[in-house]
Image (cartoon, helix red, strand yellow):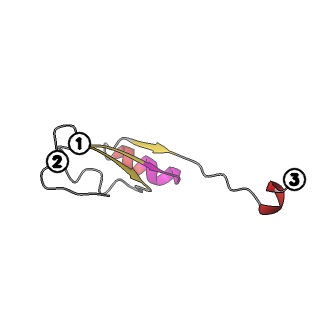
């Protein structure tokens, strides 16, 4: 994540792997959107007032991809 002392009025920050959202609310002048793959951590972040999305990663077996 990028932290800046003087963000522009239109500053936005997307935090991938944001966990509990600890760093999403560091600067109130920046609109933040977080995402994480761990449902319980996303729920904690949301309960703290963070805007967070849950995402899932699908991994394919090497052998399956050759078929």
Q: Could you tell me which secondary element the residue under label 2 belongs to?
A: loop
Dot 3 and dot 2 residues touching (CB under 8 Å): no
Horizontal and vertical percent for residue 31?
26, 41
Q: Nearer the viewer, residue 50 or 40?
A: 50
Asked where in the image residue 63 lies, by quadrant, the reply is bottom right
Q: Nearer the viewer, residue 67 or 57?
A: 67
Q: Which residue is mark 2?
A: 7
Q: Residue furthest bottom?
A: 62
User: Residue drawn at (50%, 45%), measured in percent from left and top?
Assistant: 54
Q: CA distance from mark 3 to mark 2?
A: 49 Å
Q: Magenta span covers which residues?
A: 35-43
Q: Residue furthest top?
A: 10
The stretch drawn in magenta includes residue 42: yes
Residue 11 circle label: 1
Horizontal and vertical percent for residue 2?
28, 57
Q: Nearer the viewer, residue 55 or 67?
A: 67
Q: Residue furthest left?
A: 6
The answer to which of marks 3 and 2 sits earlier in the sequence is 2
The stretch drawn in magenta includes residue 19: no
Dot 2 and dot 1 residues touching (CB under 8 Å): yes
Q: Which residue is mark 3?
A: 67
Q: Is residue 62 above or below residue 51?
A: below
User: Residue drawn at (22%, 44%), measured in percent from left and top?
Assistant: 30
Q: CA distance from mark 2 to mark 1?
A: 6 Å
Q: Is residue 66 above or below residue 13?
A: below
């Amino acid at each position: 994540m990028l932290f800046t002392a003087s963000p522009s009025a239109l500053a936005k920050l997307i935090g991938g792997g944001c966990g509990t959202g600890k760093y999403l609310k560091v600067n109130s002048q920046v609109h933040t959107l977080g995402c994480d793959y761990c449902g319980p951590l996303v729920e904690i972040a949301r309960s703290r007032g963070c805007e967070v999305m849950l995402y899932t990663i699908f991994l394919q077996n090497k052998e399956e991809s050759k078929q």
